[in-house]
Image: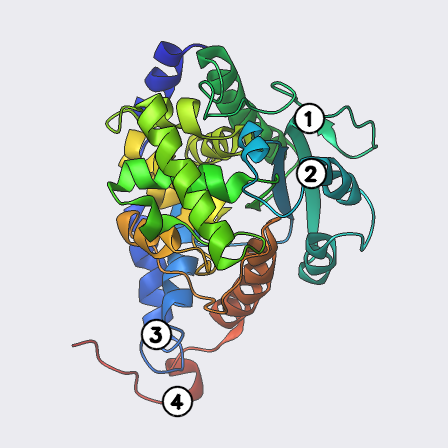
């Protein structure tokens, strides 16, 4: 796949089914509860029905797709840990209870599907899908993070992972990532695309001192100055400053729209990828479900840009898809209300009127 073929695919995507959305909204309004009593959860169930083009919603089979990749900019000392940690944690995703997402996904009844899209080491763990684009990106202080070919291949990997999940019968997918340095690449991409200074989009990531955050900001500023990304071309920004995880996640959101499956956001890296996808075709936002408001500063800006509301506001910043996994449980609860609660007629009470 080249860029021309990719954009032909992206431009062919259609909106979700608004007629189905309205039918589900009408049922919510008839249920024996205050109008809009479950707030954003009601809208998200409507969104999911519209995505699936079916008023009979089921979320029985869930997966969290985790894009795992290393980032060359780690050479600049923007993280507490080195790139070797990416391989260790990515390997742990294949073991029960060895990573936070495994525990949370277990509670949510979801499968964890880690993908090596660019880890800087060879890992042969059973359960880690090998779709390695390269052994990590390059240091964007020295050169573009990736080549055009690598960029398109990584995006296509994300699209293909959604196809695989649909073939396996998954009803909904969560998005996650693992890669030391990926809050730096995300902040860099966000700064350019949002037109904001890195000081307004950059946080402490996995844990930096005040001085460490300032160094991170300085590196991002330097990278933007050196690489001169085209802010009108989101893929150019990812190619020059981003990571394989961002590119692969962007492909997941494209794939969600292509295959009509809801994709649940996690934190800043998934938000960055979603914004890139939505800049290329705004209808992709129809297929995206927000979970939480990341503690990373750029999160609130992107949620507003793509028209989504993060429901969990807990200062989370763990990554791995943990926010998406926790949100699965809340969606399950909301869906049970939708499916089980009697309507006003069923309990002999006059329903509320919409004003």
Q: Is residue 145 above or below residue 193?
A: above
**Dot 1 and dot 4 residues touching (CB under 8 Å):** no
Q: How many neighbours does mark 1 have within 10 angstroms: few (below 14), some (14-19), or many (20 or more)?
A: many
Work out how far the residue at label 1 is from the one at label 3, CA to CA, in angstroms: 54 Å
Q: Measure the C-alpha gap from mark 4 to mark 2.
A: 58 Å
Q: Are marks 3 and 2 in contact (CB under 8 Å)?
A: no
Q: Are marks 2 and 1 in contact (CB under 8 Å)?
A: yes
Q: Quadrant of the C terminus?
A: bottom left
The nearer-to-camera label among 4 and 2 is 2
Vertically, is 153 above or below 354? above
1 or 4: tag closer to the N-terminus: 1
Q: CA distance from mark 3 to mark 2?
A: 49 Å
Secondary structure beneath disc 3? helix
Q: CA distance from mark 1 to mark 4?
A: 64 Å
Report whether residue 261 is seen: no
**Which of the labelled discs sits on residue 348, or is there none?**
4
Q: Is residue 287 visible?
A: yes
Residue at the spot of label 3? 30
Q: For the image shown, how many numbered marks are present on the structure?
A: 4
Which SS class for mark 1?
loop
Name the residue located 52 percent from the left edge and 16 percent from the top edge: 150
Residue lying farthest front? 211
Within 10 angstroms of label 2, few (less than 14), some, or many (20 or more) residues?
many
User: What's the CA distance linking mark 2 and mark 1?
Assistant: 8 Å
Q: Which mark is residue 120?
A: 1
The residue wearing badge 2 is: 86
């Amino acid at each position: 796949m080249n860029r021309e073929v990719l954009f032909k695919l992206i431009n062919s995507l259609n909106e979700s089914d608004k007629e189905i959305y309205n039918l589900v909204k009408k049922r919510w309004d008839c249920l024996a509860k205050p109008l809009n009593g479950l707030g954003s959860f009601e809208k998200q169930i409507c969104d999911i029905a519209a995505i699936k083009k079916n008023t009979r919603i089921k979320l029985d089979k869930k997966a969290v797709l985790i894009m795992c990749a290393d980032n060359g900019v780690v050479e600049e000392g923007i993280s507490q840990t080195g790139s070797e940690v990416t391989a260790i944690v990515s390997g742990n995703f294949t073991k029960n209870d060895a990573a936070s997402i495994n525990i949370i996904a277990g509670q949510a009844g979801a499968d964890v599907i880690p993908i090596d899209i660019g880890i800087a080491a060879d890992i042969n763990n059973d359960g880690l899908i090998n779709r390695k684009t390269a052994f990590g990106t390059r240091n964007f202080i020295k050169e573009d993070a990736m080549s055009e070919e690598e960029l398109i291949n990584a995006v296509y990997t994300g699209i293909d992972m959604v196809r695989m999940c649909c073939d396996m019968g998954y009803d909904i997918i969560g998005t996650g990532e693992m890669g030391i340095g990926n809050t730096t690449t995300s902040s860099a991409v966000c700064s350019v695309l949002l037109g904001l200074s890195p000081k307004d989009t950059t946080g402490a990531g996995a844990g930096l001192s005040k001085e460490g955050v300032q160094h991170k900001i300085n590196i991002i500023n330097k990278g933007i100055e050196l690489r001169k990304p085209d802010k009108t071309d989101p893929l150019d920004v990812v190619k020059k400053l981003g990571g394989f995880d961002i590119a692969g996640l962007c492909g997941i959101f494209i794939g969600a729209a292509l295959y009509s499956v809801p994709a649940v956001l996690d934190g800043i890296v998934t938000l960055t990828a979603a914004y890139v996808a939505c800049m290329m075709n705004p209808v992709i936002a129809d297929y995206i479900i927000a979970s939480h408001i990341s503690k990373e500063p750029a999160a609130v800006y992107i949620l507003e840009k793509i028209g989504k509301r993060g429901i969990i506001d807990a200062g989370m910043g763990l990554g791995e898809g943990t926010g998406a996994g926790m949100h699965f449980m809340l969606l399950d609860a909301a869906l049970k209300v939708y499916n089980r609660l009697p309507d006003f007629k069923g309990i002999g009470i006059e329903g509320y009127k919409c004003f």
